[in-house]
Every structure is written in structure tokens, then in C-alpha cells.
Image (cartoon, helix red, strand yellow):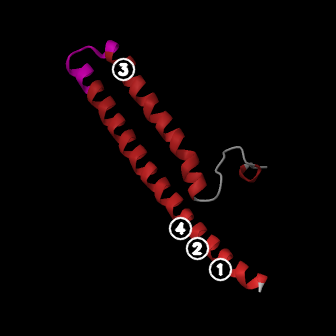
Amino acid sequence: MAEDTKLPGEAIDRYVGDYLGKAEVAVYHVVGVLLTITAAAGIASAAHMLWKGFVHWTIATETLRVLDQLLLVLMLVEIFTPFASLSARTFFSPWSPSSSSD
């Protein structure tokens, strides 16, 4: 009798675990989309600032602002990389032993 009562509990745990796993993947996708949109907006903003610098001949002063925007984009990409790795259930690393060439 004790074994019969454990089966529904295990089934519920598995059922809840499946939905939590699906919710985790959904959250990763939403975060990924938001970070992608933010990175695209940062690149567009940097391009716009660079164009304004060329048009108004103020490229020397705009360069630092453009670099600031592009560094923000690179940080956003670095934030997203672990999320993509966790979502794929693998960890991508350029220093992994399997990627070394002999």
C-alpha cells in the first residue's frame, strides 16, 4: 500500500518538473529575444551616431560615444551566451579540450 501512494507523488513531481522545464525554456527565449532587440537597437544607435559624426564633421567627439554603444552591445551578447548554452544543455567554450587541434 505504501508503494501505491508513492506513485502518484512521483508522477506529480515528474509532471511539475516537465512544466518547470518548459517554463525555464520559455523564460530563456523571452530573455534572448529581449537581449537581441536591445543589441540591435544599440547597433542602430551607434550607426546613427557615427553617421551624424560624419555629416557634421564631429567624428572625433562621436567616436567615444559610438565605442560606448558598441561595448554595450558586446556586453549584451556576452550576457546572452550562457543562456543559449544552458538552453542547449551544453556549454560552448573556445578553450574546451575537444576544440584543440593537434
Q: Secondary structure at mark 1?
A: helix
**Residue drawn at (44%, 30%) of the image:** 72
Give the CA distance from mark 3 to mark 4. 44 Å
Q: Which mark is residue 8?
A: 1
**Residue drawn at (68%, 75%) of the image:** 10
- Asked whether disc 3 touches disc 4, contact meaning CB atoms under 8 Å apart, the reply is no
Q: Work out whether residue 98 or residue 85 is closer to the camera in this orientation and state it.
A: 85
Query: Which one is earlier in the sequence, the residue at label 3 or at label 2?
Result: 2
Q: Secondary structure at mark 4?
A: helix
Question: Of circles 3 and 1, which is in front?
Answer: 1
Q: Which mark is residue 65?
A: 3
Q: Residue furthest left?
A: 56
Q: Amino acid at mark 2?
A: Tyr
Residue placed under numbered mark 4 in the picture: 19
Query: Which stretch is magenta?
Result: 51-61
Q: Amino acid at mark 1?
A: Pro
Query: Which one is earlier in the sequence, the residue at label 3 or at label 1?
Result: 1
Residue placed under numbered mark 2 in the picture: 15
Q: Work out whether residue 3 or residue 102 is closer to the camera in this orientation and state it.
A: 3
Query: Where does the image place residue 62, in percent across and percent down from the top left?
Result: 32, 17
Membership of 39 in magenta stretch: no
Query: Which one is earlier in the sequence, the residue at label 2 or at label 1?
Result: 1
Q: Secondary structure at mark 3?
A: helix
Q: Amino acid at mark 3?
A: Arg
Query: Where does the image place residue 3, in percent across and percent down from the top left?
Result: 77, 83
Residue 64 versus residue 72 in the image, above or below: above
Give the CA distance from mark 1 to mark 4. 16 Å
Q: Amino acid at mark 4?
A: Tyr
Type of secondary structure dominating the magenta stretch: helix
User: From the viewer's perspective, is 65 left or right of 29?
Assistant: left
Query: Which one is earlier in the sequence, the residue at label 1 or at label 4?
Result: 1
